[in-house]
Image (cartoon, helix red, strand yellow):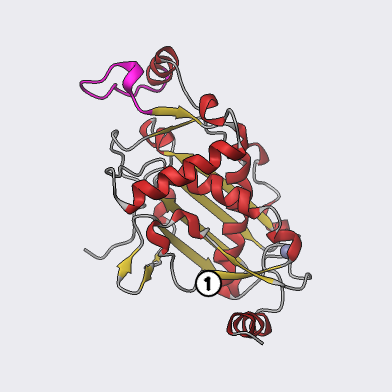
Amino acid sequence: MGAKKARLSAFLAKHPFCCFCGGSAAATTQDHIPPRGIFAEKKWPEGYVFPGCTSCNNGSARDDALVAFLSRMNVDAADGTVEAMEWNKLLTSIREHYPGLAREMILSANEVRRWMRKHGVAKPFGLTYGEVPMIRIPEVIVAAVRRFNNKLLRALHYKHTGMIIPSTAWTHLQWWTNANLLAREFPREIAEMMPGRAALKRGKVLLGNQFGYSFGTGNDGTLGAYLATFRKSFVVVGVVVFDAALMVDIDEKAVDSTVQHVVEARVEVDLAPVTNSDT
Ligand SMILES: [Zn+2]
């Protein structure tokens, strides 16, 4: 048995069940959550590998590329840096796999102006509406982010409680782009509900500016809430309550948020969640 294979079977012996689909399917693979592609220079956080069954793992490569694309939209990399090279490579591959997608993302100056007026967002100084770095997020990316968020919630809950979310559990997932933050559509008090802050690193490299999250868990692992940020591009909130009967009164209409725009790096938005710092 090769070293890689031996490591995989040791991992699967420790984590025999897929953590993404309720807990009855046998795990056959290791799944990196978040995908390695979102991290610069292939430095993804240690310990964020999860047991997945073949069916949950199928198709995630495409979603992973789209999620990485969205999260890296905000990288302000100078020419010649590794991040700039990675961005160009990702862009080339997205263009190959999704012809027409880049075109779909372009907003006209009028659309930008209308969005900014509607949301009471001021135009950045010195730019025309045509120059404001805003994009439309096409449906194919929205769908990929939703599937990814679902996996993210299940992975993080497994990591922090050791428990697999059952298929009968109540879950709530919502996400916001930095454009939603500019428009003050993100309820910042959510962040205060989550006392824990995960410190992510690989070796000595801190990764929190690329991916970071706060969380809270309770009731022996049958409750969990997570707030994750992906660079300054988007933020995801996931909540799980194992006993769905507790949640019958929640308004289901509020469950899915549709996002349409993301703003690039030149418009500075602080996406770091509020932590319960003792400073
Ligand atoms: Zn599965």
Name the residue rendered at 44%, 65% in the picture. 44
**Residue 258: % across, % down:** 57, 34
In the rendered view, does 20 fall on the left or right side of 180? right
Q: Nearer the viewer, residue 103 or 118?
A: 103
For the N terminus, give its image quadrant. Answer: bottom right
Residue 5 vertical position relative to residue 246 in the rendered view, above or below: below
Q: Nearer the viewer, residue 125 or 161?
A: 125
Quarter residue 171 falls in = bottom right
Quarter residue 234 falls in = top left
Name the residue rendered at 37%, 45% in the picture. 232
Name the residue rendered at 46%, 46% in the picture. 89
**Residue 90: % across, % down:** 48, 45
Quarter residue 279 falls in = bottom left
| Magenta-highlighted residues | 118-133
Q: Which residue is mark 1?
A: 160
Q: Is residue 84 visible?
A: yes
**Residue 165: % across, % down:** 67, 65
Q: Around disc 1, counting alpha carbons within 10 Å, would you say few (fewer than 14), some (14 to 19), or many (20 or more)?
A: few
Image quarter where ligand 1 lies: bottom right
Name the residue rendered at 73%, 67% in the picture. 53
Residue 109 vertical position relative to residue 217 in the rendered view, above or below: above
In the rendered view, does 160 fall on the left or right side of 113? right
